[in-house]
Image (tube, rainbow, N blue to C red):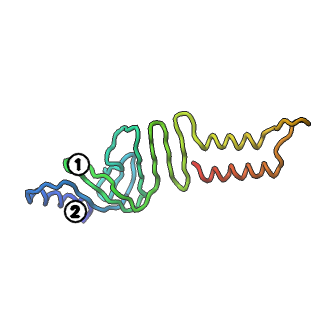
Amino acid sequence: MSFAEVFKEAVSKSRNAGTRMKHQTGIGVVKSIDGDTCQVDDIEEVRLNSIIDDLDSQITVYPKVGSKVLLGKIENEDTPFILKYSEIDRVIIKMGDQIFEMKDGKFSIKNNVADLKGILNTTFETLQNAIIITPSGPGSFSPDDVAVLVQQNQLLNQLMQ
């Protein structure tokens, strides 16, 4: 019996018994993700957040496809939502125009004006090509210093999206 069938049967039994369920929970496997919802077993629309709305601040956790999730359903609501995750694919934290995202071992920090990776990449590239003005004329960083700057920029790109 599928999770959806068990879920429907539990709801039906609770209604037939003359009692109202305040909430329900169940466990299922994530089959696919589409926007703010995912498919868990045979349930095609499971919300990633308990409230789906255009909010100024929210944290959205995207489970890995194939992972197990704990679902919840509140009285008078038709659509279940995810309460807990066995494995996470991506996390997005949004606060106003600020966005922090973690995915694939990397992260990004952005707002509507700039992003941290872009700022740091530009800084490293500028330093690598910098011309230093000295009393005896123009100079530049030593080849060893430039190699360190290149290495640090490569590490930054491995850490940030």
User: Picture quarter containing residue 95?
Assistant: top left
Left or right: residue 35 versus residue 25 is: right
Q: Residues within 10 Å of mark 2 (few under 14, many from 20)?
A: few
Residue in view at x 39 percent, y 51 percent: 33
The image shows a total of numbered marks equal to 2
Picture layout, residue 68 above or below residue 79: below
Amino acid identity at mark 1? Asp
The residue labelled by disc 2 is: 6
Residue 45 in the image: x percent, y percent? 31, 50
Amino acid identity at mark 2? Val
Residue 124 in the image: x percent, y percent? 70, 44
Residue 142 in the image: x percent, y percent? 83, 48
> Viewer-proximal residue, 8 or 150?
150
Q: Compute the Cα span from label 2 to label 1.
A: 15 Å
Q: Residues within 10 Å of mark 1 (few under 14, many from 20)?
A: few
Residue in view at x 22 percent, y 47 percent: 77
Q: Quadrant of the N terminus?
A: bottom left
Say whether disc 2 or disc 1 marks the residue closer to the N-terminus. 2
Residue 84 in the image: x percent, y percent? 36, 58
Left or right: residue 152 versus residue 60 is: right
User: Picture quarter containing residue 8?
Assistant: bottom left
Residue in view at x 31 percent, y 48 percent: 50
Asked if labels 1 and 2 touch by Cβ distance under 8 angstroms, the answer is no
The residue labelled by disc 1 is: 78
Q: List the single residue furthest toward the bottom.
A: 1
Left or right: residue 9 versus residue 113 is: left
